[in-house]
Image (cartoon, grey):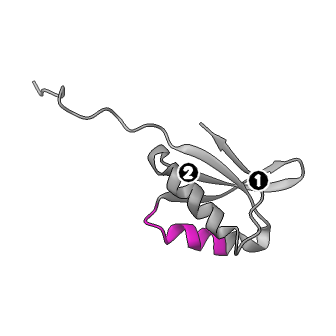
């Protein structure tokens, strides 16, 4: 029988991060996120909240601080609005 006692614990679930974004900025936003070592998995899933478009992204919990910094930098180039994080 295999001894699995020395294996690390399973990875934590990814955070679901919704980013308010105008539709015309989606392609640039998507490309910019993919350029950073796949710390973010951008999706094209859209959620309508209070009449605003929010695009879904998956982020590993350990990368969230770096992704927050990246999103703040991207705000200089893209009209990023609110950000909602779901555990």
> Which residue sits at x=47%, y=51%?
63
As displayed, is residue 71 above or below residue 60? below
SS at mark 1 in the image: loop
Name the quadrant of the C terminus: top right
x and y percentages locating residue 43 in the rendered image? 61, 58
Q: Which residue in the rendered view is the most extreme toward the left?
A: 1
Q: Residues within 10 Å of mark 1 (few under 14, many from 20)?
A: few
x and y percentages locating residue 47 in the rendered image? 76, 50
Circle 1 or circle 2, nearest the eye? 1
Task: Looking at the picture, tell me which residue is in the foreground, 49 or 70.
Answer: 70
Q: Which mark is residue 82?
A: 1
Q: State the extent of the magenta-drawn residues as a range.
A: 28-38
x and y percentages locating residue 13 in the rendered image? 48, 38
Q: Earlier in the sequence, mark 1 or mark 2?
A: 2
Cα gap from disc 1 to disc 2, whole angstroms: 16 Å
Q: Is residue 34 magenta?
A: yes
Specify whether 14 is left or right of 47.
Answer: left
Quarter of the image where one finds residue 16: top right
Specify whether 73 is left or right of 66.
Answer: right
Q: Residues within 10 Å of mark 2 (few under 14, many from 20)?
A: some
x and y percentages locating residue 36 in the rendered image? 48, 68
Q: Is residue 77 magenta?
A: no
The residue identified by callout 2 is 58
Specify whether 20 is left or right of 11.
Answer: right
As displayed, is residue 68 above or below residue 8? below
């Amino acid at each position: 029988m295999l001894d699995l006692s020395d294996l690390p614990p399973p990875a934590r679930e990814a955070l679901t991060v919704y980013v308010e974004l105008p539709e015309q900025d989606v392609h640039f936003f998507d490309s910019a996120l993919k350029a950073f070592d796949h710390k973010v998995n951008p999706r094209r899933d859209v959620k309508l909240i209070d009449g605003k478009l929010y695009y879904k992204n998956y982020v590993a919990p350990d990368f969230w601080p770096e992704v927050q910094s990246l999103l703040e930098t991207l705000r200089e180039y893209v009209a990023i609005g609110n950000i909602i994080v779901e555990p």
